[in-house]
Amino acid sequence: MPRSVLIVSQSHRYRPEELRRLATDLLSRAGLARERASAMARLLLWYDAVAAHEFGIASLVTWLARLERGEFDANQEGRVGPEHASTAVLESKRGLPPLVLARAAVIASQKARDVGVGMVRVVGLPEELGPAAAIAADLAIGPYAGAVLGPGSAQAAAVPSAEGVPVVYDSTLGAGEEGGPPEGAIDRLAPWALLAGGEDVLVVAVAVAAFESLVSFHRRVASAIAGKGERPGWIFPELWQARREAIQHAGIPLAADTLRAIRERADSAGVAFPGPVG
């Protein structure tokens, strides 16, 4: 995934649970119901947990500004359109994109649980979505493989592993660097990506047990990633776990400009700002 040098002092590190509370409070002030604000905060902090800080809590101010400008409807969860046993269409209706995708993932996983595969076509989302790794990873916590395809050539995918956390790939996190999915992976995904169609997004969940045992699948996953170090766009279980433990202990780093912008938002909204780690 793309990495940038982030130089912060210990006074610029904050505990994840405190930042989630802060983000939830600010998003609630922006019009989101408390439960949905907390869900959005969790999705942002997911990226901090894998060191993709650009898309983590640092992006909160941008999301708040877009809500204020009326780009999104804080109360809109999307509307389910045509639906069948394994497929559905979800119209975003200007809902907040990460939460609309999260709802699509819930629908897809429910269908995969019932019939082995679930595919939800999401229409009406903006072209610039950013990464969808957090959504794909949520789908793969358990006996499912998950993918978020689109808009355009963007793709995120995750498969479960024996470690309990999935192996994740996201083309946005690997943008501009060497890496990417294994040779041929894009060709294999192409028919599914075409189902999404241009600006639309296809959220897919597949029950692994519909094709093979989880034990066998986990062995194949472990063999595929054995010996591989950090690669752009990829998040492997061992590194992911190490980073989660690190931020729980040392806190999430906030660059000075990010810290200033979020603090100004908190002061304006009358929301208490947390103290730094230590």
Image: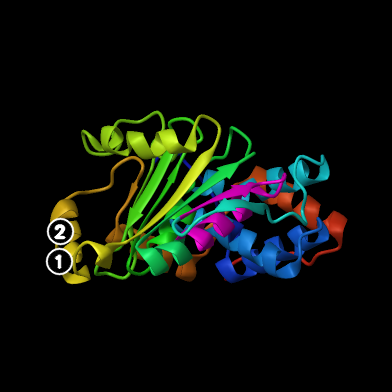
Q: Is residue 102 magenta?
A: yes
Name which quarter of the figure residue 174 lies in: top left
Q: How many labels does the image show?
A: 2
Q: Residue at x 85, y 58 (%)?
A: 269
Report whether residue 192 is seen: yes
Closer to the camera in the image, 269 or 111: 111
Foreground: 273 or 240?
A: 240
**CB under 8 Å between callouts 2 and 1?**
yes
Query: Which quarter of the image is occupied by the N terminus?
Result: top left
Q: Residue at x 52, y 61 (%)?
A: 107
Secondary structure found at label 2: helix
Q: Nearer the viewer, residue 222 or 185?
A: 185
Name the spot of residue 92 as percent of width and height, x first.
66, 46
Q: Does the magenta stretch include residue 193?
A: no
The correct choice, above or below, for 58 with respect to 179 in the image is below
Residue in view at x 36 percent, y 69 percent: 142
Q: Position of residue 33 (x, y in %)?
A: 76, 65
Give the residue at mark 1. Answer: 216
| Crowd around label 1: few <14 · some 14–19 · many ≥20 (10 Å) | few
**Amino acid at pointer 1:** Ser
Q: What stretch is highlighted in magenta?
A: 87-108
Q: Position of residue 123 (x, y in %)?
A: 60, 41
Q: Which mark is residue 220?
A: 2
Q: In which quarter of the image is the C terminus?
A: bottom right
Tell me the quarter of the picture where residue 156 sits.
top left
Q: Dot 2 surroundings within 10 Å: few (below 14), some, or many (20 or more)?
A: few
The answer to whether residue 128 is above or below residue 278 is: above
Q: Where is residue 153 in the image (x, y as percent from the top left)?
A: 43, 31
